[in-house]
Image: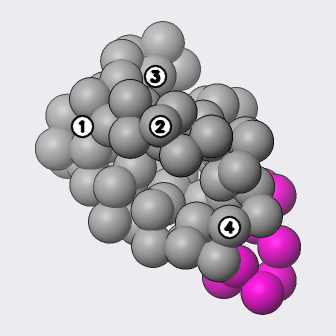
Amino acid sequence: MISIESIEKAIDSIRPYLLADGGNIKVLEITEDHIVKVEMLGSCGDCRMSSMTLKAGVENAIKQAFPEIKGVEAINLFPEAV
């Protein structure tokens, strides 16, 4: 079973880039259907590029470490950021 801690470690490879732009990310849960729910923090929460960061950066890093993960969803992106 994949743990939140192991997902956080997978995100650590891109976390310096998020922090450099004033943002961060927190893993909230992993659903039974292998979707990772995250909260975008700091500037990542309201940046117009957050959806691209989420898919191209975060989701890619997680799927490389855990191919069984089907997707990553942010619970707090503003509609204009999606």
Q: What amino acid is at disc 4? A: Cys
Identify the disc placed on residue 6.
Answer: none
Identify the disc placed on residue 8.
Answer: 3
Magenta stretch, residue numbers = 75-82
Residue occupying image coordinates x 52% and y 33%: 19
Q: What amino acid is at disc 3? A: Glu
Q: Which residue is mark 4?
A: 47
Identify the disc placed on residue 66.
Answer: 1
Of 75 and 14, the residue lying toward us: 14
Q: What amino acid is at disc 2? A: Ala
Q: Please state if 15 lies on the left or on the right of 42 as rendered.
A: left
Judge whether 2 appears above or below 39 on screen.
above
Q: Please state if 21 lies on the left or on the right of 46 as rendered.
A: left
Of 45 and 58, the residue lying toward us: 45
Q: Is disc 2 placed on a helix, strand or loop? A: helix
Label 3: few (<14), some (14–19) or many (≥20) C-alpha neighbours in 10 Å: some
Q: Position of residue 82 (x, y in %)?
A: 66, 82
Q: Is disc 3 placed on a helix, strand or loop? A: helix
